[in-house]
Amino acid sequence: PPPSVKPPLAAVWPPVPGLATVIRRVATTDRVVFLTLDDGIEKDPAFVDQARDLGLPFTQFLEDEVIGDHYDYFRRLRELGNRIGNHTLTHPELAGQGYEFQLHEICGQQDVLHYRLGLEPHLFRPPYGDYDRDTLRAAADCGLAKAVLWSAEMEPDGLVYRSGGGLRPGDIILAHFRGPDMLKGATMTDMITSLLREVQAQGFAVARLEDYI
């Protein structure tokens, strides 16, 4: 269940007026971690069933270029209670690019998500986790209050950690909408099953990120 009081942000880039706040994990002692899924390349119908059957909470950070005309798939996941964030129009490396370019990539995806899904997301994930001050200014100017990084990543061979050898309370896990061609023959549901088994083996539950931030 959601905490009675949201914990303080464990900010990487402290809150500054006019800039999105950067977080990599959540400052909580609850034995929970948070699942995020990026881009939207794979659109496996079996994953919708899996997410529904498990009641699995996650946040989707969507990129327009790889989704094209298939936003209905992600609408179905949203209808299960899984929130949607902004992951730019075309997934460029933003740091070092001009402010106007970054504004176009980020606000452009806000416009797409509003048009396609009727949403105004408040969470942003910079492609590759790469950002500079202009990225955070553009994100804030597009209505995105927080830039969400990650502390662990699900790769084809299992979880990889930014630091240490295991999960910690409040870790944000990055995974992707991927299929067999990018998962060494495994399906997306196989990948999610492996991930959840590892999370449980380490004594954690998956919570909804938006309940904590």
Image (spheres, rainbow, N blue to C red):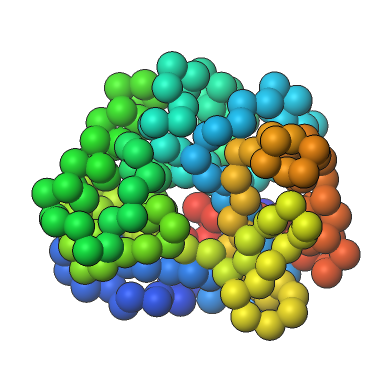
The residue shown at (83%, 68%) is 203
Task: Say left or right for 110 vs 65.
Answer: left
Figure disc tally: 0
Image location of residue 21, percent across then percent down: 32, 67
Percent coordinates x, y for residue 8 in the rendering: 45, 74
Q: Looking at the rendering, which quadrant does residue 105 occupy?
A: top left
Name the residue located 30 percent from the left edge and 22 percent from the top edge: 115
Q: Eyeballing the image, is 186 above or below 42?
A: below
Residue 75, above or below 177 = above
Q: Is residue 179 left or right of residue 115?
A: right
Seen in the image, is 199 located left or right of residue 91? right
User: Of 16 and 74, which appears nearest the observer?
Assistant: 74
* Residue 131 falls in image quadrant: bottom left
For residue 62, say whether it is visible.
Answer: yes
- Residue at 40% x, 75% y: name it: 11
Residue 32 or residue 37, whichever sits in front: 37
Q: Residue at x 38, y 55 (%)?
A: 126
- Tell which residue pokes out farthest to the bottom in this image: 164
Give the x, y percent position of residue 125. 41, 53
* Quadrant that contains the N terminus: bottom right
Tell me which corner region of the image, top left, top right, bottom left or bottom right, holds residue 4: bottom right
x then y, percent, for residue 29: 65, 77
